Image (cartoon, helix red, strand yellow):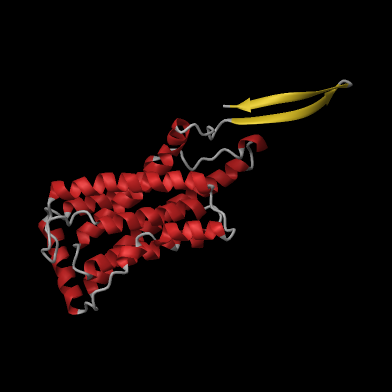
Amino acid sequence: MKNLLLSGLMIFTGLSALHAQDQDTLSVHEVQDSIVPISKRTIDESHQFSYKKLIIPATFISYGVASLSINGLKQLNFSTRNEINEHRPDHIKLDNYTQFAPAVLVYGLNAVGVEGRHNFMERSIIYGTSMLITSAVTVPLKHIVKEERPDQSDRLSFPSGHTAIAFASAQFMFREYKDTNFLLSVSGYSFAVFTGLYRMLNDKHWFGDVVGGAGFGILSTELAYWLYPKINSLLGGKKEKSQTMIMPFYQKGKMGIGLVKNF
């Protein structure tokens, strides 16, 4: 099981780096909040594009693509599968459901009053966009790459669609709760890792397929958050950075109402 444990460690190490990066960014924002005017503190910065957010998914995707042709990584695929075969449990299909578990948790928590960053409509648009991007990337890629599955059932192995959806869902949960409850926000990754491992245990994917799928899933959700303001604008929603404030004032014995609009 040495290779299998190493596989899980690689995924967790990458995610830890991603979370540490977001924590660093959060601390900077907290400092900035202490010096900017109150009227600007409500501006949502979660949809701003940052190249740093692409490092982890790009690394995972690069590894997955490299595993298709580099002999050393292909050998790791086979050795991991051989070790799994020695300890494989009875076939289970929980991975068909755990891929959506983090997103279900987000909606369930909101229903009982544990609010995330966005309301029902906003997060539905974001998650729906993430799922569309995930499917638009992974499904055609499977037919282009034509990598044979470990069980030889077909040639649609790379990337793992289940794992992509699972990590897209986990990243969605992370982004919704990372500013209010960090431990809760990362809990969704346990379901994502479980899904990836059991795709291998069920002999449906190689290790490289799972790592690549994780990268595509994380990337899809990051793109969905970045695209949300544009999609919301197209749907006729209110611009996120546009703020209007009506304030009464009293100056030199005169009273009135002032209108302040921030674009």
Total numbered badges shown on the rendered structure: 0
43 left or right, relative to 89 = right
Figure check: 191 above or below 122: below
Q: Position of residue 185 (x, y in %)?
A: 48, 58
Does the rendering let one see residue 261? yes
Q: Quadrant of residue 11?
A: bottom left
111 left or right, relative to 213 = right
For image coordinates 37% across by 57% down, the residue present is: 15
Camera-nearest residue between 171 and 104 = 104
For image coordinates 35% across by 64% down, the residue present is: 97
Give the quarter of the figure containing the C terminus.
top right
Camera-nearest residue between 88 and 69 = 88
137 left or right, relative to 185 = left
Does the rendering let one see residue 178? no
Q: Quadrant of residue 125?
A: top left
Camera-nearest residue between 2 and 85 = 85
Q: Residue furthest right?
A: 253
Give the quarter of the figure containing the N terminus.
bottom left
Q: Position of residue 152 (x, y in %)?
A: 10, 63
For image coordinates 54% across by 40% down, the residue present is: 44
Camera-nearest residue between 98 and 209 = 98
For image coordinates 39% across by 55% down, the residue present is: 169
Q: Position of residue 36 (x, y in %)?
A: 63, 36
